[in-house]
Image (spheres, grey):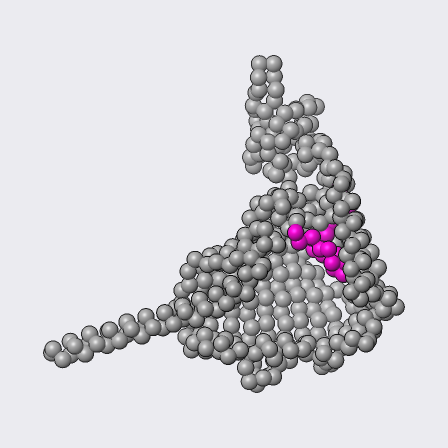
Amino acid sequence: MGFLKKLFATLILAAIVVFGAFKGGMWYLVSQQLNQMKEAFTPYGVINWKWISTSFDGDIVVERLSINSFALKNEIVVQRLQLQFDGIKPMLEFAWGVHQGWYPDELTINAEHVVLQLSPSSFNSLLPNDARFSAFSPFRLYDCGDNEYLTGRQLQAMGYEKLDYNVRLNYVYAPAEGALSARLNVEGAGMGRGLLDVVLDYDADRVRPTTLFAGWPSLKKASLNVKDEGYFRRIGFYCSRISNASEQEFVAGYLQNRLAALQENGVYLSPVFADAWKQYMTQGKALAVGASPTQSFSLDDWNDTEMPLGEKTAEILEHVKIQLLLGGQPLGAELIRIDRDQLNQLDFTPEALEQMRQEALARQAEASKTVYVAKYRGVPVENMDNYANRPVKLQLDDGRLVEGVLVAIEEFRVEVESQVKGGTVSYFIEKKQIESAEIYY
């Protein structure tokens, strides 16, 4: 009996040692990788994390990963970064293989609540000074007062206190099929969501970034699904108030300028594509774009520096079938047309790009001199939530005009504080009584 007790105690102790060695070893390997990343990022900012944990299910978790960028001047916090493996064996292979320059055949990365708390200066340092991309920048605005690009000040005015995203990246390598499939899913709270699926030709013994990205991989197919969940409607409301236009007029002007920017560079979208874009912005309809080559070809073959840009783009479009779906319904063919001559004339030499950059900076400097003048502006009753503690004028259905400060906004009524001879008085007004509202901002 004594021997069995000693054997049992020895087995328990061995299990504890193995468990501790496994947990400690994985912690060391992940911590080492993070420290290497932290050191490489030192010239650009500071990276920190709270703790690292692992599980026998095949998970590695980094809690509260914070990134402080010197350029952004704001802290980005990833509440939970999780690497998911199909069991403990692939996780151990990853821990070993990453040092050898290869990755497992399947990996899922979850970044939960990637948060940036907004301030008025957020994104000020990221204004697109590069003239090549300024026309296509998602931060660029049109017909929105003196606002040429979105910064934290505009996003806060649109009702955003923070940017909060969940990101999921998964890839699967199938050696027998010679294909690598990747899926990226991004969801932004109050912004929208997007899903990108890509299948690439890939034939190697392992998933090696040095091999995969050594040149342009061959594309089997790709699709992009996007859905707006408030961003374009908020920006439409915000900019329409500033430009004294209706939201429909702002969206029409926005699209017209976007299409004109594309056409200046030799890219023409069909009316069907433009109308789908409009419905995506105004109605929140899901928009899906699919691309599949009509024959196998490599982008490396297309990456010929001697070939003019227009010829390159035309060659790609000739080999790729593009499909557009709006709300799940397929739309017509010939969605994109390019003008080879216009694209061929674009000059992307360093001298030309520097000149365009200087011209863009000069335009921004001139625009920044414009003084924003606060005044009473019409606001839909259902959108008054963003304007608490501002002066307000309410036209009621009985003909009365109520002036004061908008103290509180509830679901069915608002509270207004008005000046009287003896001081101030506060009272509630039912929203259904309000015919129109003007707010000073």
Q: Is residue 270 visible?
A: no
Residue in the image at 76% along x and 46% along y: 365
Point out residue 332 in the picture as x, y percentages from the top left corner.
Answer: 78, 66
Instruction: Answer left or right for 105 relative to 438.
Output: left
Left or right, residue 1 beside residue 376? left
Going 81% across and 76% down the picture, which residue do you hit?
Answer: 306
- Rendered location of residue 183, percent (x, y): 59, 69
Tell me the residue at 67%/71% (across/down): 222
Q: Quadrant of the N terminus?
A: bottom left
Q: Which of 195/10 is in front?
A: 10
Compared with 314, 328 (above or below) is above
Q: Position of residue 433 (x, y in %)?
A: 64, 29
Query: Is 236 located above or below residue 200 in the figure?
Result: above
Front-most of 302 and 297?
A: 302
Q: Which residues are magenta?
A: 125-146
Side of 223 relative to 21 (left or right): right
Picture coordinates of residue 338, whole percent (x, y): 83, 67
Q: How many marks?
A: 0
Prevalent SS, magenta region = loop
Q: Nearer the viewer, residue 392 or 32?
A: 32
- Extreme residue in the left direction: 1
The outermost residue toward the front is 43
At a point 45% along the width and 77% down the height, the residue shown is 96
Residue 102 visible (yes or no): yes
Q: Going by the picture, which residue comes out furthest to the right?
A: 341
Quadrant location, the C terminus: top right
Residue 90 drawn in magenta = no
* Residue 273 location, quadrant: bottom right
Residue 134 colored magenta?
yes
